[in-house]
Amino acid sequence: MWYLKAQWHHDFDDEPVEMLSEIADDGFEVRKVEIFSNGHMDWADAGRGTGTTAISQMPIPTVDEIDTQFEYSAVEVDSREFETVWLRALEQTAPGTQ
C-alpha cells in the first residue's frame, strides 16, 4: 500500500480541494477522502461512500504523473496521516453529526 495526498487548485465551490487516497500495490484505490474548501469531508471505500465520492475504477497515476498537471500538486504521505484524516471523515459523517 501507498498513500497519496493531492491538492486540486481551482475555484469551484462544489468540488474538493484536497484528496487523500490509500492505494494498493496494483495501483487501484482502496479508500479515499475528499476535503472541500469549507472543511466538509466525503469518503469512499469499496462498498460505501458519502456525497458523490467514489473509488476510481482506473489505476491511480504516480505522484510525478499527477504533478505534471498544472492544476494539481501531489505528495506521498504515510499511513498515519491517511488514517487520521480517514477517521475524521468517518466521524464527520456519523449519524447525528451531519
Image (tube, rainbow, N blue to C red):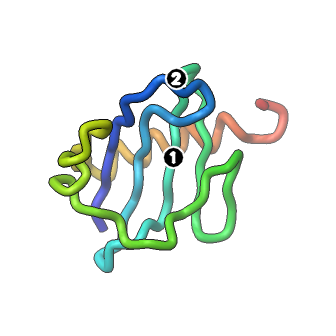
Q: Quadrant of residue 96?
A: top right
Q: Position of residue 95 (x, y in %)?
A: 82, 40
Which residue is at the far bottom? 26
Q: Quadrant of residue 22?
A: bottom left
Which residue is at the far top? 38
Quarter of the image that includes the C terminus: top right
Which residue is at the far right? 96
Q: Which residue is found at the position 43% from the left and 48% from the top?
A: 83
Q: Is residue 74 left or right of residue 39?
A: left
Residue 96 vertical position relative to residue 66 in the rendered view, above or below: above
Q: Which residue is found at the position 37% from the left and 30% from the top?
A: 9
Q: Position of residue 15 (x, y in %)?
A: 56, 35
Q: Which residue is found at the position 51% from the left and 72% from the top?
A: 57
Q: Nearer the viewer, residue 31 or 94?
A: 31
- Mark 2 is on which residue type? Ser
Residue at the disc numbered 1: 33
Give the number of the disc on residue 37. 2
